[in-house]
Image (cartoon, rainbow, N blue to C red):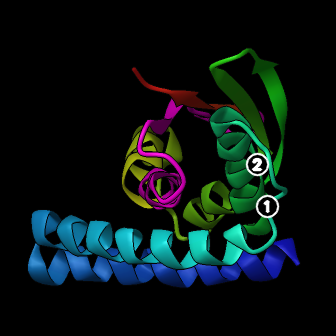
Amino acid sequence: MFDGVRRAYMLQILYVMNTVEEIGTDKALELLEKSSQRQGVIVARQMKKTLPEGLTSIEIGAEVYRRFMSETGAEISVHKQDETSVTFVINRCPFFEAFLDVGVDCGTFLNGLCTHLTLPSIQATLNQFDPNLKVEAVLTREAAEDLCLERVYLSE
């Protein structure tokens, strides 16, 4: 399954790269953000049907993040957790591998990938549960043997 998911992301990445070439970076990123917002509403609607009752906001945020990333094919686990945040380690990421497949130097561009492709979709989903839930990249891998850390937290 991981390879099939990675191939789907390859197509999306190539499409975004071609879109950037055709209409420019700013407009392409604006359209990607708009798409992320719509995706967040759809994904949240689906997840709300199966989330357990009685979870705190941070528990909801952690579960939504875990499901979102796991369902994309990423291999994740909890790295650190407290009352207001959960930090996840991403050991294997189909987005990262898809960028390598299309020849993008992830060590240079990966923060852009997380900032513009994955995190806006996750953030848009979290917003449907609690607007104070936030997600951020803490550490971004620069090589295949590295890992990423991403944190879900409650803002003030």
| Secondary structure category for the residue under label 2 | helix
Q: Residue 94: image x %, image y %? A: 70, 62
Q: Residue 63's mark?
A: 2
Which residue occupies 54% across, 54% down? 129
Q: Is residue 52 left or right of residue 89?
A: right
At label 2, the amino acid type is Glu
Determine whether 28 is above or below 95 in the image.
Answer: below
- The reply to whether callout 1 and callout 2 are in contact (CB within 8 Å) is yes
Which residue occupies 71% across, 36% down? 56
Q: Is residue 66 left or right of residue 132?
A: right
Residue 141 visible in rendering: yes
Q: Residue 155's mark?
A: none
- 60 and 135: which one is in front? 60
The residue labelled by disc 1 is 51
- 37 and 132: which one is in front? 132
Determine whether 90 is above or below 94 in the image.
Answer: above
| Crowding at mark 1 (Cα within 10 Å: few <14, some 14-19, many 20+) | few
